[in-house]
Image (tube, helix red, strand yellow):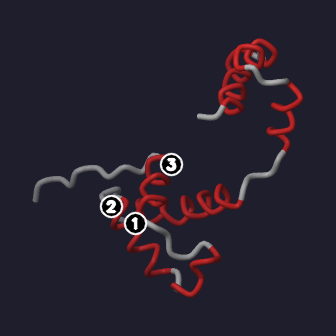
Amino acid sequence: MSRYRFIAAEKVTAQAVLPACALLGVSRSAYYQWRSQPPSHGRRQDVELGERIAPIHRESRETYGYRACKASCNETVPSSSIAHGGASNPYRTASEVLRIGTAPTLCPAR
């Protein structure tokens, strides 16, 4: 977690930007500048990947892990669009599965 994310979380819980900035050695202006920036290209791709993973995970009755989600994502998106957020690597898919909270559950016994 970055310093700025910590300050943002602290602001939500305690409404205290100034003490958090002082504790972490960050100026308030730097924090507010960070907060006003748009998400990075990689972050936007992660959000898009999460939007593709969530329905795949639901349709699998929440049994797919990151490998199956990655395979399904890569089947639905042509590999020619990798530069445009198409196919993803397994590490990025795994971190996004964890971030959005779609960990697989065990299948019931048959």
Neighbourhood count class around disc 3 (C-alpha, 10 Å): few under 14, some 14–19, many 20 upward = few
Q: Residue at x 77, y 14 (%)?
A: 22
Question: x, y percentage for residue 8?
Answer: 72, 29
**Image quadrant where one finds the C terminus:** bottom left
Neighbourhood count class around disc 2 (C-alpha, 10 Å): few under 14, some 14–19, many 20 upward = many
Depth order, front residue of 55/44 = 44
The CA distance from mark 2 to mark 1 is 6 Å
Q: Earlier in the sequence, mark 2 or mark 1?
A: 2
Q: Residue at x 65, y 27 (%)?
A: 6
Which amino acid type is shown beneath numbered disc 3? Answer: Ile
- Disc 2 and disc 3 in contact, CB within 8 angstroms: no
The CA distance from mark 2 to mark 3 is 14 Å
Q: Earlier in the sequence, mark 2 or mark 3?
A: 2
Q: Earlier in the sequence, mark 3 or mark 1?
A: 1
- Disc 2 and disc 1 in contact, CB within 8 angstroms: yes
Q: Secondary structure at mark 2?
A: loop
Which amino acid type is shown beneath numbered disc 2? Answer: Tyr
| Quadrant housing residue 65 | bottom left
Q: Which mark is residue 80?
A: none
| Quadrant housing residue 13 | top right
Above or below, comparing residue 86 to residue 61 in the picture: below
